[in-house]
Image (spheres, grey):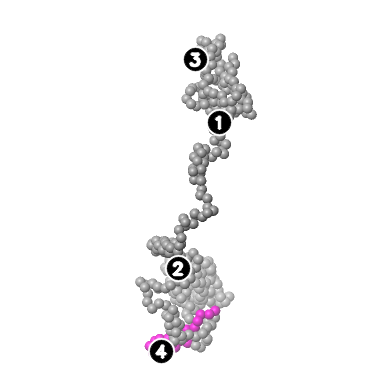
Amino acid sequence: MTMPAKKNTAFIFYMGLVSQANTKTMQSNPTLAAGDFKVSTDGGALTNLTTLPTVTPASGKMIKVSLSASEMNGDNVTVVCSDAAGAEWCDAVVNISTNARSIDDLAYPATSGRSMVVDANGLVDANTVKVGPTGSGTAQTAGDIIGDTNDIQTRLPAALVSGRIDASVGAMAANTLTASALASDAAAEMATAVRTELTTELGRVDVAISTRLAAASYTAPDNAGIAAIQAKTDNLPPDPADASDIAAAFSSLSDQVSEVSVVSTGSAPNKLMEAFVLTTGSEVSGAYTDTFGVEQTYHQLADSAGTLDAYYETTLSPGRAPTAVGIIGHVNGANDDIRVIE
């Protein structure tokens, strides 16, 4: 058995099952169980139907077979019926040949009883109707369509230019013209046009501008005085108000110690410092270990509110006494001193 249907669209058909007890009759109220009905798409593997067929109407000889859209997604859909659980009804095979369109997809007259008229040449004689929500509209004859076409042609150029319509633009929406749409020499042409217009406008100035400056009330600038001021300001730092420049120039009350050493009796000279104590003030840069040699690296200290109190310490061997202390460095500030305490 073969029947037409629409591809990839749910489909329902009815059939009867032949009784095994009497093959001349259809089985009345057949027993249907899962696995009795399988489907194959385009000769593919058989799988159980998603929906088990039902006896419709109840206790009758017809069964209703429902196929889903996915089960109908093939050119040939085959349903195999087999009473796997018993010996009640005979096997059956139904093949469904699908089409992309069905009869329901064909156009038909909206008014019942109307039909297409075909002339002797096999041409259909019909009027076209404007599209509307229910097919409403004004009937259009071939002459109407030609008239509309001729009206359009009057609004178009008679010929194309290099395959395109050559027309003038009266108005353009904002941000329509882009840089890529301009010709490569467009900028040069616009610049030339600006220069031409500018030359024309400048030509309308009938008196040189320089002659207008020599008026009685005009006072020439003191160029020599301005140059003298500039000569002085050129000697100022880049930012005269920058406090860091002033601090760097004067290093107010900052102490720098490059090397501190002690010479003691019976010991090697240049005994280096072993500790540092800062009671008042702060370390600006370096550490006390930077006093171990003269290499332009300083242990720099700063006072606190005008007071700086710091100690460099080292320990001599028992019985040894210092004979000299060498210091390389300087102290910035008045009434400051460096003491050696044994």
Region rendered in magenta: 115-133
Left or right relative to 152: residue 255: right
Q: Secondary structure at mark 4?
A: loop
Q: Name the image quarter holding residue 320.
A: top right
Q: As drawn, which residue projects farthest toward the right?
A: 305
Kindly report the distance in space between the C-alpha atoms of the residues bearing marks 4 and 3.
134 Å
Residue topped by disc 2: 40
Kindly report the distance in space between the C-alpha atoms of the residues bearing marks 2 and 3.
108 Å
Q: Examine the rendered structure and indicate whether residue 285 appears above or below residue 64.
A: above
Dominant SS type (magenta): loop
Whether residues under marks 2 and 4 lie with C-beta atoms below 8 angstroms apart, the answer is no
Kindly report the distance in space between the C-alpha atoms of the residues bearing marks 1 and 4.
115 Å
Type of residue at label 2? Answer: Ser
Kindly report the distance in space between the C-alpha atoms of the residues bearing marks 1 and 3.
35 Å
Residue 290 showing in the rendered view: yes
Whether residues under marks 1 and 4 lie with C-beta atoms below 8 angstroms apart, the answer is no
Residue 24 showing in the rendered view: no
Q: Nearer the viewer, residue 336 or 282?
A: 336
The mark lying in front, picked from 1 and 3, is 1
Residue topped by disc 4: 119
Kindly report the distance in space between the C-alpha atoms of the residues bearing marks 1 and 2.
100 Å
Q: Secondary structure at mark 2?
A: strand
Type of residue at label 4? Answer: Asp
Q: Secondary structure at mark 3?
A: loop
